[in-house]
Image (spheres, rainbow, N blue to C red):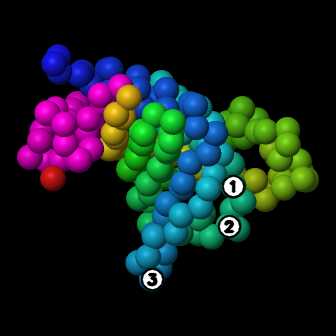
Amino acid sequence: MNKITAEQLLAKARELMKATEYCFFITESSGGHPHARLMQPYDPEADLTMYFGASPRSRKVQELCKQPKVSLAFYDQQQAAYVTLLGAAATTDDPVLRQKYWRANWNDLFPGGPESADYTLIKFVPERIEMMNYAHQAMPQPYSLHPTILKRDGQKWIVAAEAEAS
């Protein structure tokens, strides 16, 4: 079997992320326990940076202000595939981004629209990707129950060595 490349893995990860309407956004509470909530991300940027709309008063925003390391988890039941992204998140109030990342059906949640003081963006930048996709053989070969791991190396992604995967 041919070894799958980082570019092929990234394409499969991006495809799954774009096909999944929601993901789990996981932060760490002040008590050290993870808090997971279902969120609707925008499609990933070319470098896999992702944006989410949120209230600056929400628990998730308060938690990521204290601990910026978060995880995103995407799952596709039909393909028996998942992608987990680990990285750092921070809020941004850039007015151009707030307009770009606005959904019309959010008017009930944020009555002031994208300019509302109760609307902020969360910018997530991944540093590590863990994934398994049985349908597309995006997993370590020979077959194993360990995920394939990609790590950011500057501007590119590399497949982590098996020893790092454990």
Residues at circles 1 and 2 in contact by the CB criterion of under 8 Å? yes
Kind of element beneath mark 3: loop
Q: Is residue 151 magenta?
A: yes
Closer to us: 144 or 82? 144
Image coordinates for residue 78, horizontal then vertical, percent = 51, 36
Closer to us: 36 or 111? 36
**Residue at the image point whose x is 76% and y is 39% from the top:** 102
Q: As shown in the figure, which amino acid type bears the numbered disc 3?
A: Gly
Q: Earlier in the sequence, mark 1 or mark 3?
A: 3
Q: Disc 3 and disc 2: Cα gap in Å? A: 17 Å
Image coordinates for residue 136, horizontal then vertical, percent = 35, 25
**Residue at the image point whose x is 40% and y is 47% from the top:** 84
Image coordinates for residue 63, horizontal then vertical, percent = 53, 69
**Is residue 85 toward the left or the right of residue 96 in the image?**
left
Q: Earlier in the sequence, mark 3 or mark 2?
A: 3
Q: Disc 1 and disc 3: Cα gap in Å? A: 22 Å
| Residue pointed to by mark 1 | 54
Report whether residue 10 is seen. Answer: no
Kind of element beneath mark 2: loop
